[in-house]
Every structure is written in C-alpha cells, then in structure tokens.
Image (cartoon, rainbow, N blue to C red):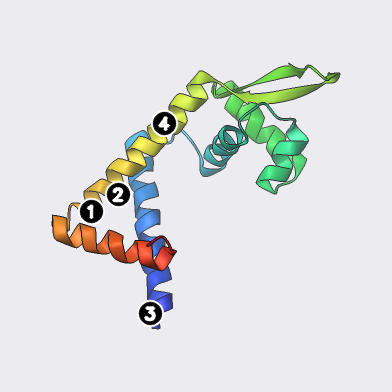
Amino acid sequence: MQPSEELLDLLHDVLRNARRDASERLGDAITPGQLRLLRTLDRLGRPRRLGELAEALDVAPRSVTSKVDQAAADGWVRRVPDPDDRRATLVELTDAGRERLDAVASSREAGVRARLDALDDDEQQTLLRLLRRVAGRG
C-alpha cells in the first residue's frame, strides 16, 4: 500500500470510529442526513428556503422536504414565513437544534480525545505537528 493510500485509509478509520463512538453515546437520536441538514443550516447562518437547502446539500428538493419534516418533528428546526414572499416559508434552526449540534460535537471530540489518550504528550504533539504540515498549516 502506498503511503498516500495508507494515510487516507487511516484518516477514514479515525473519523469513522469517532462518528461511531459519538453515535453510540448519543444513541439513535440523529441520522447522518439530519446532522448534515442541521450543520448546513447552522453554517448558512440564517433561515433558508427548501430550494436553497437542497442546493446547499446537493440533493433533490423532495429529499430535503422529508428531512425538514423529521427535523421539525424532533424540534430541531421550524418553518417560518418568508418576510419577502408570503407564499414561501423558510427553515431555521431552533435552540434544540443548536443544542443537538453541540452535543454531537462534544461527543465526537470526546471520542477523538480518547483515541489520542493512546499516545503520550510528546507523541500527540508530534502527530499534530505532522498533520499540520500535511494539511498545509505549518
């Protein structure tokens, strides 16, 4: 296996394991698609129309509708009137949606921290220094 292939494989394993650990800690409370929807709304920074969400997520509009319906039922998003067009609605993240995002982020961070604990402090610093160089950050 080439070093580049091994790096990709290892990074994939670390991230997949961090997601799996977080999922186990959080239970089946959120699907990857729902998480992606919440993250996208958070990143966009303001309420958006379903079509804009579909474009940002690069999925079919009907796919977004079902995700929004489920997220609204879970209390993570809500539909609000579009102030510029009374016929349209916008989707916005709720406080509960932000709390869910924070919980997922905290859980993933705890999983990564646990994996780093397999290394001593010097090894952790070396790993981070090398990854920064590979990432072009140092």
Type of amino acid under label 3:
Pro
Residue 91 drawn at (x, y percent): 68, 26
Q: Mark 2 points at which residue?
A: 112
Q: Mark 1 points at which residue?
A: 116
| Label 4 or label 1, whichever comes before in sequence order | 4
Viewer-proximal residue, 76 or 136? 136
Q: Name the residue under label 3.
A: 3
| Label 3 or label 1, whichever comes before in sequence order | 3
Cα distance in 3D space between marks 4 and 1: 21 Å
**Residue at the (40%, 36%) spot, across then down:** 104
Cα distance in 3D space between marks 2 and 1: 6 Å
Type of amino acid under label 2:
Val
| Label 4 or label 3, whichever comes before in sequence order | 3
Label disc, if present, on residue 26 of the rendered structure: none
| Label 2 or label 3, whichever comes before in sequence order | 3
Q: Residues within 10 Å of mark 3 (few under 14, many from 20)?
A: few
Residue 134 drawn at (x, y percent): 40, 68
**Residue at the (37%, 34%) spot, across then down:** 26
**Quarter of the rendering occupied by the N terminus:** bottom left
- Disc 3 secondary structure class: helix
- Disc 1 secondary structure class: helix
- Left or right of residue 57: residue 49: right
Viewer-proximal residue, 46 or 56? 46
Residue 45 drawn at (x, y percent): 61, 31
Type of amino acid under label 1:
Leu
- Left or right of residue 86: residue 101: left
Q: Mark 4 points at which residue?
A: 102
